[in-house]
Amino acid sequence: MKTTITLIAIASLGASALAQNNPYIAAVDEYVPAPGQFINTMPVYEAGEDAAIMAQKCTDYLANDAGKTVCLGAWGGYITFHFDHPLVNVEGVMDLYIKGNSHTGNAEPGIVMVSQDENGNGLPDDAWYELSGSADMDDIEIRYDYELEYTKLGDSLDIAWSNNLGNAGFINRNPFHDQEYFPAWIESPLTFKGTLLPNNATDTSGNGSYWVLEPYRYGYADNLPNTDTLGCSFNIDWAVVPQTREAVHLGYVDFIRVYTALHQNCGWIGETSTEISGAMDLHPDAEIPASIEAISMPFKEKKTSFDLFGRRLSQGLSGFAVSERKIILQR
């Protein structure tokens, strides 16, 4: 019987990068906004540009604390970005700070999600986890299985929407913004799934002239002014499985995603849309503990697997966790 054992990596990630990691966004991986009055302008779309070019424009707006603002559009619209290193979960402190453009009476909260590059391909295509915010703790109704579809009916027309609750309506155009409201590089229809927070807007004037959008207590991007450092910060320990709300322990994450959490219209102000103007790793030189990336043990004859101590594994067991990384045992 021929046996091959391949040890891929045993390393302490981050040890060689001490005091060298950039605390600011390195690049935007995805920009998939929902329709809205600022879409195709923040950043500006030009004819013929595709998703890759628009993501690069977002990188130019946000990377290295450039300070410009990207609009995510109505509910579900999102942006995905990463740093030049894994974002480490440091026990007992906040890990991530995200800037928006919120100010008093104008909170447009966005849900924050995180992901590890488990398959090692450098793409944000692995499992995503939601950072649970204060709405999960408060006595309010939240939908964790919301689904919304946007349809472009024609150039420069209101955008139709329908949801999985049997409701329908429009993202209405207004006289202040005359460009196309549907993201021009994305085909219609456009569908999003995720968590829907309760509306936070109140027409305090009673005649539609003055709207106040109250913030949630914590846990959402573009929810509190950037000067509220703690209110704009996030802890990886808040990670949960989006549908079940089961807590998940992540020692680090590779990708961050933010999406608009509200589906509401505020009269002449228009749809609620989360904006992002930057992000920062609050401890960029924290180290990931030494770990074993993977072990493969293919057998040409008898299909058997063993753990690191030479013990035979039961049939069907394909892996176990060591120091936050997964050891894959392939038969």
Image (tube, rainbow, N blue to C red):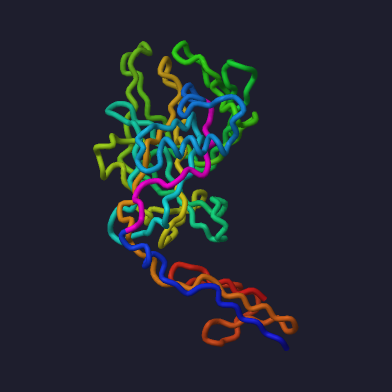
Q: Main secondary structure of the magenta part?
A: loop
Would you identify the image quadrant in which residue 88 lies?
A: bottom left
- Quarter of the rendering occupied by the N terminus: bottom right
Vertical placement of residue 135 versus 103, above or below: below
Q: Can you name the residue that lies furthest to the right here?
A: 301
Please tell me which residue lies in front, 164 or 117: 117
> Can residue 70 be found in the magenta stretch?
no
Res. 140 in view:
yes
Would you identify the image quadrant in which residue 105 lies?
A: top left
Relative to residue 125, is residue 79 drawn left or right?
A: left
Q: Position of residue 19 (x, y in %)?
A: 30, 59
Please tell me which residue lies in front, 273 or 202: 273
> Can residue 33 be found in the magenta stretch?
yes
Please tell me which residue lies in front, 83 or 322: 83
- Quarter of the rendering occupied by the C terminus: bottom right
Residue at 33 percent of width and 16 percent of height: 210
Q: Position of residue 239 (x, y in %)?
A: 42, 54
Residue at 45 percent of width and 32 percent of height: 262
Vertical placement of residue 205 versus 236, above or below: above
Res. 134 in view:
no
- Provide the residue span drawn in magenta: 20-35
